[in-house]
Amino acid sequence: MERLHHATLFALYQITLLCGIALLPLALLTQRVGFRLPVDRAILGVKEAYEQRRPKRS
């Protein structure tokens, strides 16, 4: 069960990175008009969750 949770978090992290890269042109455009897309917060949140659940290496 732990491996499944770890694999799911890893896949979610990778998908979030892909979406962040795909949304970069839109984020830059919206930033020019004064609106900011919170893509960085989404990526950092998933990254933190993934790193907390990552098995410790000795």
Image (cartoon, helix red, strand yellow):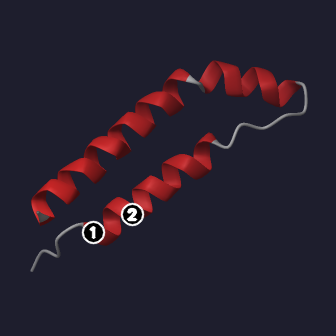
- What is the quadrant of the C terminus in the image? bottom left
Q: Which residue is mark 1?
A: 53
- Give, as a three-letter code, the residue at label 2: Ala
Spatial CA distance of label 1 from label 2 is: 6 Å
Q: Which residue is mark 2?
A: 49
Front-most of 18 and 4?
A: 4
For disc 2, the neighbor class at 10 Å (few under 14, some 14 to 19, many from 20) is: some
In the picture provided, is 17 more to the left or to the right than 27? left
| Res 33 → quadrant | top right
Q: Position of residue 26 (x, y in %)?
A: 68, 20
Secondary element under disc 2, as helix, strand or loop, is: helix
- Of all residues shown, which one is farthest toward the bottom? 58
- What is the quadrant of the N terminus in the image? bottom left
Secondary element under disc 1, as helix, strand or loop, is: helix
Residue drawn at 34 percent across, 43 percent down: 12
- Of all residues shown, which one is farthest toward the front? 1
